[in-house]
Amino acid sequence: MSQAYMTALRLALNQRTGRPWRTRRGRGTSIDKIYVTSPPDRKKAELGTMMSRIDRAALAEALIIPVDQIVDMAVIMPDQRDEKLANVLRDLQQE
């Protein structure tokens, strides 16, 4: 996974949702995973979470995953990368 992929995903999510997101790679045994979170200025904990309901809903819609799978961040597994980026980009091309 390249930095170019991470940048493309982040920019596509930013454009699709109209709000900035942070993307990062995992470490150690999770190095192939991608984590998507709200930036620090939007991390206002709601009863034990670090992502607001609005952020969770926007991210779930953009990545086409159930909102209940997102608590503090969205995790994109290695076998899902191409599909998730294609979903976000396809939505942008249709708008």
Image (cartoon, rainbow, N blue to C red):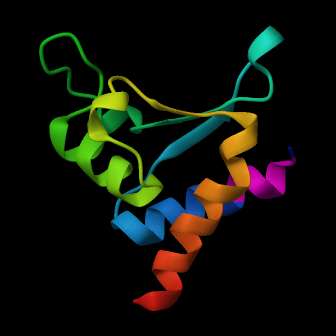
Q: Residue at x 59, y 41 (%)?
A: 23
Which residue is pictured at 21% across the width and 10% down the height?
48
Q: Main secondary structure of the magenta part?
A: helix
Magenta span covers which residues?
2-7
Q: Who is closer to the viewer here, 4 or 29?
A: 29
Q: Is residue 44 left or right of residue 26?
A: left
- At a point 24% along the width and 47% down the height, the residue shown is 57
Residue 94 placement (x, y as % from top left): 45, 89
Please give the name of the residue rendered at 35% of the width and 64% of the height, measured from the top-left corner.
17
Foreground of the two, 76 or 5: 76
In the displayed structure, 19 sits above or below 50; it is below
> Going by the image, does 48 lie left or right of 47?
right
* 3 in the magenta segment: yes
**34 sits to left or right of 42:** right
Is residue 34 visible in the rendered image? The answer is yes
Count of numbered badges drawn on the protein = 0
Q: Quadrant of residue 37?
A: top left
From this view, report whether residue 13 is shown above or below residue 28: below
Depicted 71 relative to depicted 9: above or below: above
Give x and y (percent) for residue 51.
28, 30
User: Is residue 93 inside the magenta stretch?
Assistant: no
The N terminus, quarter of image:
top right
Between 91 and 20, the residue placed more toward the observer is: 91
Q: Give the x, y percent position of residue 75.
A: 55, 31
Instruction: Indicate the position of residue 89 as horizontal and vertical percent values.
Output: 57, 73
